[in-house]
Amino acid sequence: MLTKWFLKMLNREAASQDAQKIIQVLRIREGDIIADIGSGGGYFTLEFAKRVGNTGRVYAVDIRSKYLQFVKSRAREEGIDNIVLLLSKKDRVELPENALDLIFCRNVFHHLKEPSKYFSNLKKSLKADGRVAIIDYKPRFGFDFVSFFRHYTPEEVIKSEMKKEGYFLVESFSFLSEQSFHVFGVNSMREALR
């Protein structure tokens, strides 16, 4: 009961934080294959699933099976059947190789003990022109949840960790007041663009 309430709260929070603008700037197309890492209550999973249509697929990835069951229930209620539930380990995700157009990570980066290793493992799942979108809280000071529990990552750390593992910055967005938002590609993609 408490889990369900918490996940509904997460979804309300996601919806209120420029979610539609986030989805718009990611330019999701019908037929895309997306992994929503740390899917939580599934707000973005469900929105992505609607946009990729019947020819696309969304992997809802989380380390908590209760969260995935909640997403499954919501998808069933909304008549969405292009979502694959994937229970992962904290340090590794097993996704199909060379399959993903987008890996989406919202408020996950600060939970990773070894982010460079984590994203190194994910690289093999991206298509050559695949992208990784990372949204995470910016550092702030005070006595709120984000600052007290260190639920943030400085932007320089995100960029540095991604660069270390062969990613390059494709674009950054500044419309989220409390979070950074960066999209990365793999270096093989940059070589192809030259």
Image (cartoon, rainbow, N blue to C red):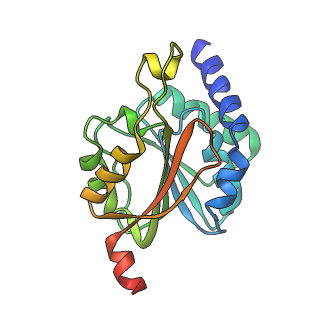
Q: Quadrant of the C terminus?
A: bottom left
Image point (61%, 60%), residue name: 26
| Image-based side of 182 in relation to 56, left or right | left
Image point (53%, 39%), residue name: 39
| Image-based side of 36 in relation to 48, left or right | left
Please, is residue 173 above or below residue 146 in the view?
Answer: below
Quarter of image, res 88:
top left
Please, is residue 2 above or below residue 101 in the view?
Answer: above
Image point (54%, 16%), residue name: 144
Task: Give 161 or 49, whichever is nearer the viewer.
Answer: 161
Residue sticking out furthest to the front: 141
Image point (28%, 39%), residue name: 91
Find residue 160 and report its horizontal and vertical position in percent: 30, 52
Find residue 114 and report its horizontal and vertical position in percent: 25, 40
Find residue 131 and report its horizontal and vertical position in percent: 46, 63
Q: Quadrant of the N terminus?
A: top right
| Image-based side of 7 in relation to 123, left or right | right
Quarter of image, res 86:
top left
Find residue 54 and report its horizontal and vertical position in percent: 67, 63
Task: Give 55 or 22, whichever is nearer the viewer.
Answer: 22
